[in-house]
Amino acid sequence: MNLCFLWHMHQPDYRDTEGVMQMPWVFLHAIKDYYDMPWIVSRHSGLHVTFSITSPLIAQLKLYYENPEQADRFLSLWIKDPAMLKENERNWLAKICKSSQMDTMVSQFPKYKALYVQEDFSNDELLDLEMLFILSWCGTYLRRNNETVSALIQKQQNYTSEDKKMLLVTLSEFIATILEFYKTLNDQGTIALSTTPFYHPILPLLIDMQNAKKANSLTKIPDNSISLKEDAALHVKKAQILFRKTFGKEPKGFWPAEGAVDEKSVALLESLGVQWIATDEAILYRSLKSDQKEHIYKPYRYNNMLIGFRDHSLSDKIGFEYRYKETNEAAADFLSELQKIENSNGNATVFVILDGENAWEFYQNNGYDFLEALYSGLGKAKWCRTLTMDSLKTVEAETLETLAAGSWINGTFDTWVGHREKTRAWELLFLTKKDYEHHMDILEESVCSRISERFLVAESSDWFWWYGDDHHSVFDEEFDILFRNNLIAIYRLMGLVPPNDLFVPIVKNKSSGNFWIKPQADISPMINGKRDSFFEWMGCGVIYEDKLFSTMDRERGPVKTIYYGQDREKLYFAFEGEIASLCKTAFLAMMIDPVGLKVKVPFGKKEVLAENIKIKAACGEWLELSIDKAGLELETVLLRFEIEDESGALQTLPSFGELAIDMNDDYSQNWFV
C-alpha cells in the first residue's frame, strides 16, 4: 500500500498594521516544532512525507532572524528587566507565560510548576517564570544539540538577565536555519513541499458565499455578501511567488486552507498551474454518486486536478487520541489500522493529513517518542511504502465527475460562517470592501497596494475560526482587535474616518465567564447519581466543556458540563453529558496535585480509599463524586480528570488544564436572601 503523510505547518498573521508581532506563537512553535518535524523525518532512511508551509508562517519566521525583540511585542517585554515593566505589562507577560500545557510541558520543571499557580511575582520570580516558559517550548532537537539550551534547562532557577539575552540570541540564530533545512531535505527528495493560498483564506467563501449554504442549507450567511474572486486569485499568486523566492522552485501542490474546496476554487488553482490538492474524505462521500458511497483508497482526479482525500479517523487518532496511549501501543495501533485498510482495499493509497505543530504540546516529550516509534514501524512494514504528494502522479487515480463544496470539518463551512460573531466579521469585511471600491479610482497605486494587503490579511480563515462559541482561546480579545484593526487601517489609508462599528468588539463579553462560572457558595449535595434537587448544586462552579475548544477541532467527549464546589469537609463534582451508557463500563482517572496522586474510580463502585483519601462516587443520571478534604491537607488542590473505558481515554477534563481549587475559599461575601 501507499501512505501519504501531509503535515500542515501554519500560524495566523499576528502582525499589527505596523508590522509588529502581537502574539509569540510563531516564535514558540519555531523553537519547538518547525525544525523538529523534518529533523525526525530525516532520521529515517526511505521515509518520505509532505510538508505544507503557509505564507504567513514563512514571512513571520523571517522576522526572528535578527533582533527578534524589535519584531515581537512579547519578546520586547520579555527581554526587559522585570523591574522596568508596568503593571499591565507584567500581567500580560504572566498570562502568556502561564499558557504552556501543565501535564506535558510545565510539570517537568518543578520551579515552573510552583510559579504557574501563583498570581503575583517578585522581580526574580517573574524572570524565572519568563525563562522557564521559553525553555519549556524548546523542542527535542534543541535540548539534545544546543549547549546553551541544555545548560539553562539544568539550571532550573535563579536566572539572570544575561541568561535571557544569551538564550534569545541562540534561539534567533536557530530559527534562521529552519527554512533552509526544509529546502535541503526537499532538494534531496526526502520531503515534498507545498503551500496554501497566501493568508490562509477559505477560497470557496471568497469566491461565492453561497457555498456555505450548498454545504449546509441551514447556515446563515451575510446579507451583504459579495464575491471576492479577484482577492482569491491574488492569494494564490502571491503564495506561489513567496514559495518560489524561498525554496527556489514552483509549488506543485496546495493544501487549500482548512481543506476547503468547491468546483470554482479548484478551477482557479488549476488555471494557475497547481497540479494536486488535498481535502477531507467527507467531501469525497458527498461528491460520489449514490451508488458509489464507498471510500476507494486511491487518489482521485477532478477534471485535471489530482486530489488526495484525508482519512479522517487515522488523522484524528494522531491529532487527538494517541496522546493518551503508551508510545509503542499507539504506533502499533496505527499500523494495525493501516493493515486493515490494505486487507480490504488491495493496493490502497491512504492520506493522513493534519496539523503539524499543535498536537505535540499534548504529547509527552513533544511527540518525539511517538513519531520515532511510528516512523520506525513504517520502515519495517515491507507491505507499506511512504510517498510524497508530488509522487501521486505515479499512482492510478479514480475519476470524479463532480466535487462537493465543503471543508475538513464536517464537510461544511459552519466553523467560519453562520454564528452571529462570524457573520458580523464577514459583514464588516464586505462593508469595507464596498466602501473601498467607491474610492479606489482616486487613490494612488501605492495606497491601493497597501489596502489590498490589509484585505488579504483580514480574509484569513483564522479570525473566523475564533469567533463564535465553537472555539475558545484566552486570547480571543486580542484576535478580535487584530482583525478589526486591519479594516480600520483601510479606512485610514483612504483618508476616511472609520465607521464606529469597527471600534465595537465583535466578541461580546467573551471571557472565562462564558464557559466557566466560579463557585459562589458552599454546597453539600447527596452523592447518589441523581438530580435530587436544583438547590443541591445552587452556587456551585460550572465549566461548560462544549464551549471549550482550542487551536484544533475534534470529536466532543461524553462530558458536556462539569459542576463543582465544596463545604468544610468535602470537595464535590458532577459530570453531565452522555454518562448513563458508561455507568457499567467506564471509570474516572483522577490526578491530584501537588501530591502527585492518581486514583482510578470505577463508575459502578461507590467508595474508594487511596492514600487515606476517601472518595465516594455514584453514576446514574450523571456521575457524582465527593473527595474528603481530611486526607489532602493542602491549601490549594490541582485536579485533572480522565473519562476512560476499555478502549482507552475518552476525554480529559477540564480541557483548559488543571482545575485549581482554594480549599479555604470563603463565599460569605456572596451570601444573599
Image (cartoon, helix red, strand yellow):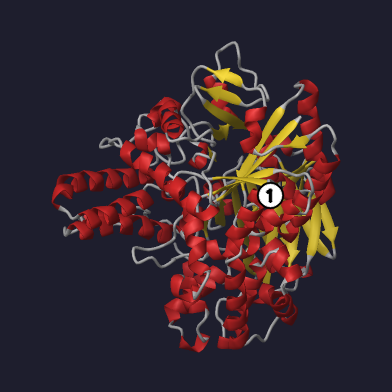
- The amino acid beneath tag 1 is Gln
Q: Report the residue marked by disc 1.
A: 188
Can you tell which quarter of the image residue 21 is in?
bottom left
Residue 391 in view? yes
* Badge 1 element: helix
Q: Residue drawn at (71%, 57%), measured in percent from left and top?
A: 39
Q: Which residue is at the front of the view, 344 or 244? A: 244
Quadrant assignment, res 119? bottom right
Side of 59 where 177 appears, left or right = right
**Residue at 51%, 68% in the rendered image:** 64
Crowd rating for badge 1 (residues with CA inside 10 Å; few <14, some 14–19, many 20+): few
Residue 243 in the image, given as x and y percentages of width and height: 50, 50
Where is residue 438? Give x, y as percent: 15, 45
Q: Is residue 387 left or right of residue 445?
A: right
**Farthest-out residue, top:** 291
For residue 281, above or below residue 489:
above
